[in-house]
Structures are given as structure tokens and as C-alpha cells.
Amino acid sequence: MLLDTYGRVATDLRVSLTDRCNLRCTYCMPEEGLSWLAKPDLLTDDEIVRLIGLAVTRLGVTEVRFTGGEPLLRPGLPGIVERVAALHPRPRMSLTTNGIGLARTAEALRAAGLDRVNVSLDTLRPEVFTALTRRRRHSDVLAGLAAARAAGLTPVKVNAVLMPGLNDDEAPDLLAWAVAGGYELRFIEQMPLDAQHGWKREGMITAGDILTSLRTRFHLTPEAESARGSAPAERWLVDGGPHRVGVIASVTRPFCRACDRTRLTADGQVRTCLFATEETDLRRALREGVDDEELARLWKTAMWGKKAGSGLDDPSFLQPARPMSSIGG
Ligand code: SAM
Ligand code: SF4
């Protein structure tokens, strides 16, 4: 098991497949100038499958989420999904994507064994999408979402980040749209993980702001705490249900005490937390030819050192050197 000193057990593995992306979301990346990981430093498809296999067969991981950067940019993705689906025990598999290209690939990913997707969409307004992401791809994301739903990659969850002065007035419209389309919407508080270190706590849109805005149009009933488990999102029933809305309040209401995550970056580093400042280099160990026993030992040791929390509330908090796009969000 991947146990830490606070008694938490990591069963949910986030795997970043690339740090590259075809959007430039303002809360994630600068417009230009971000340097990418060098190709030889990226894990190969075989190395990724070996490490996921190790996590699933020896370390108790039951959920695998592919992310990035933009994971659909990784050419080997369907093959990786297919090989992970063949593992015993078979983990549940999902993908976090900006949705661009999903219209073309959703069926094949479903056939390869992917269970479901999270698609990021912050706005229903094409011009606001262009301002937020610096690319005119709004219609591609909507097409990707529809294709994911049609392919049965369900429940399709939609991740939205609200930014002051851009889309902070859109929470109720996004929820009405999600309810009508059968998508499960989750708002994510903006976190200090942007490559350009531009995050400011003052002025960020908080969970409290989001709920106040949603309640102008919807009746929200909190879901029982017991239904939450280790999920980072707090959830509410919308107008009595069955539709739900979630808020991931990593900044104002962190949920670290129930965290069940372990992370693998595209260059083969184990991270215990998005906000960790230390990493464990599994790529080097892999390429030095160590056996599975030793890789498992390194991974367990890394998790044993997991900190109690993100440290966001500590005045001495320092943003990690790696941005979200390189850690894998
Ligand atoms: N490119 C894919 C996407 O956008 O869904 C996957 C990677 S992205 C880093 C994963 C999620 O992190 C997205 O939902 C995105 O909105 C969110 N995200 C990125 N930067 C963030 C930040 N600074 N604060 C909060 N969420 C962020
Ligand atoms: Fe790309 Fe996702 Fe970051 Fe947006 S949030 S720039 S889509 S990695």
C-alpha cells in the first residue's frame, strides 16, 4: 500500500502524459515563453505502462487518471489505455482534457477501455473562451463534450475555473447548461500553480462567491459528508436533484486530510501532492534497470513522506517550481 504517516492510503494515481498543450489558459500558462520538457526526458509508453502496472498490481492503486498538459496530444494514448485496461486487477480509468480532439477520439478511447472523462470548459461565450485560453477553439470543446457523452464516457464531468472580470458572472449559466446537457459541473478555485506565478489570493473567486452566485438561480442542498469520501469536490443537489454541482475549494476549504492521491509526472517523478516541493525520480531508477521490488520501495518511501496538507494557509507557503501543466492537474 502507499501509506503515509497520517494514515492516508493513496489509491488514486494521476499520470501526466505530456506538459504540452494546444491552449494557453491564463491561470495555467503564459502566452509564450514556457519551455517544454525535452523528449528524451519523457517516459516512453512502455515505461508509463510498467509504472502504472506496478502501482495497480503491487501498490493498491485502483483509479488511474490521465492528464497533462493536454493528454490528447500524446499519440500513444489509446495504446496506453488499452494496455492498462488489460491489467489485473483492472483499474478504473479516466482522462482530464480540454476536449480539443475528443470529437475524433472519444469512440476509440472508449473502445480501448477508458471509463470516463473530465472536460475543462470555463465559459459558454466564444469570445470569453478566446480571452481565457488565447485560442479560438470553443466550438471544438463543445463538439468534444458531445462526442464524449455519445461515446458513453460518462458521467462526463465539466471543470470550470472562474476568473475575476472574465467569466465570474457565468456560474448560474454554466450550471443551467450542464443540467440541460447531462454534464456534472464542478467549479475549481484558482490555485497558485500557474507557470507565470501571477496568482493572488485577494480578488480570486472563492467557493463562497461561487455558491452565492449559484443560489441566485438554484436551490442547493448539501450532499451528506459521508457521500464525499476522498473526493476533493464538495457537492450539492441542484433544485432537489438528481443533478449535482461540485466545488473544489483547494484554497479556502482544503480537504487534505482525506487525500488519496499519488502523482506521476510525464518525466517520471513521483509527487505526493500538487503543492509538493520534493519529487522522487523513478525515471532514473527505471533506466538504471532496477527491478519492480525496488521501484515499489521508492514509491512507498516517497508517499511515506507526504505532508499533512498543501501548506497554502501557511504564511511561509512557497509555490512549487513546477507549474500545473507540468505536474499534471
Ligand atoms: N489540459 C487538460 C485540461 O485543461 O483539462 C488537463 C490538464 S489541466 C492542468 C487540469 C485541470 O486543471 C483543468 O480543469 C484546469 O482548468 C485546471 N487548472 C489549471 N490551472 C489551474 C489553476 N491555476 N488553478 C485551478 N485549476 C487549474
Ligand atoms: Fe492547457 Fe489544461 Fe493548462 Fe488550459 S489548463 S493551458 S488546457 S494544460
Image: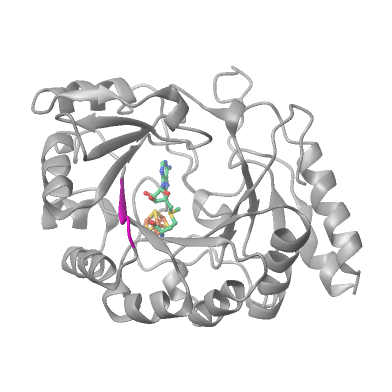
Given the current orientation, which residue lies at the most extreme left position? 217
The location of residue 3, given as percent across then percent down, is: 76, 39
> Residue 239, relative to residue 188: is it above or below?
above
Q: Residue at the spot x=27%, y=37% of the render?
A: 245
Q: In which quarter of the image is residue 246?
A: top left
Q: Is residue 67 visible?
A: no
Q: Does 238 lie within the magenta span?
A: no
Q: Quadrant of residue 189?
A: top left
The location of residue 326, given as percent across then percent down, is: 56, 57
Q: Is residue 248 left or right of residue 93?
A: left
Q: Is residue 112 left or right of residue 3?
A: left
> Residue 30, relative to residue 245: is it above or below?
below
Foreground: 263 or 313? 263
Q: Residue at the spot x=67%, y=73% of the render?
A: 49
Dividing the image into four quarters, tell me where ligand 2 lies: bottom left
How are the residues colored?
Answer: one colour
> Residue 227, relative to residue 32: is it above or below?
above
What is the span of residues highlighted in magenta in the rendered image? 154-159
The location of residue 102, given as percent across then percent down, is: 31, 73
Foreground: 4 or 275? 4
Q: Residue at the spot x=79%, y=29% of the render?
A: 5
Q: Is residue 91 left or right of residue 127?
A: right
Q: Is residue 318 visible?
A: yes
Foreground: 318 or 155? 155
Q: Residue at the spot x=24%, y=23% of the render?
A: 221
The count of marks equals 0
The location of residue 65, given as percent across then percent down, is: 52, 58
Q: In which quarter of the image is residue 216?
A: top left
> Residue 280, relative to residue 154: is it above or below?
above
